[in-house]
Image (spheres, rainbow, N blue to C red):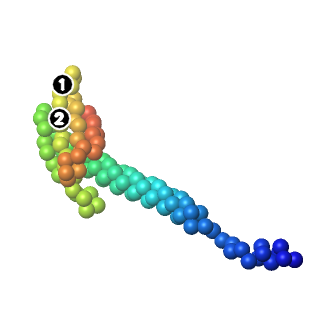
Amino acid sequence: MMRTLRRRDRATGFTLVEVLVAVAVVAITLAAGLKAAGALTDNAQRLTDIVNAQWCADNALTNLRLAKQFPGVGDTDFSCNEMGRDYQGRLVTRPTPNPNFRRVDAVMSDANGAPLLTLSTVLGRY
């Protein structure tokens, strides 16, 4: 009977080292989760910028088609605002081997000048 009393007298629980290891594991897990969440946020913002820039480029190329004028060779700068964000664009018009067609590239960049996308089309003489 003395043996069972002695076992009950001993303190039970976690040691300080075990608690520190558990806290370290939780901290590492939370840090990895925050890093992953940050990457997802950055990717979502990048995708939003690319979609908005594509709308701007598509609108600029559609305006050229609707004008029904054969575009001259050269570069033209334009700006666009989609969903509250400003984008810079350049229409790059180049000749093709067939003189009745021109290749037009809409090169889009963000407000800081970082390139986002290039959308191309071929316009014919009307």
Crowding at mark 2 (Cα within 10 Å: few <14, some 14-19, many 20+): many
**Which percent across, then down, holds residue 104?**
22, 36
Q: Nearer the viewer, residue 31 or 65?
A: 31
SS class, disc 1 = loop
Instruction: Name, please, the residue furthest toward the right.
Output: 1
Dot 1 crowding, Cα within 10 Å, few <14, some 14–19, many 20+: few
Q: Is residue 36 above or below residue 9?
A: above
Residue identified by numbered label 1: 99
Q: Which residue is mark 2?
A: 93
Residue 126 appears in the rendering: no
Task: Describe residue 10's horizontal placement relative to residue 91 as left or right.
Answer: right
Disc tally is 2
| Side (left or right) of 22 relative to 75 | right
Indicate the amino acid at tag 2.
Thr
Looking at the image, residue 94 sits to the left or right of residue 36; the answer is left
Q: Residue at x 61, y 67 (%)?
A: 15
- Residue at point 18%, 37% (across, down): 92
Q: 39 and 56: which one is in front? A: 39
Q: Residue at x 34, y 51 (%)?
A: 46
Residue 112, how many percent across, how many down?
19, 51
Give the quarter of the figure containing the C terminus: top left
Give x and y (percent) for residue 36. Answer: 45, 54
Mark 2–mark 1 distance (CA, rounded to whole Å): 13 Å
Residue, x 40% and y 53% (percent of image)?
39
| Mark 2–mark 1 CB contact (< 8 Å) | no
Q: Is residue 85 visible?
A: yes
Q: Most extreme residue toward the front, as rendered?
A: 2
**First reached walking from the N terminus: tag 2 or tag 1:** 2
Q: Secondary structure at mark 2?
A: strand
Q: Amino acid at mark 1?
A: Pro
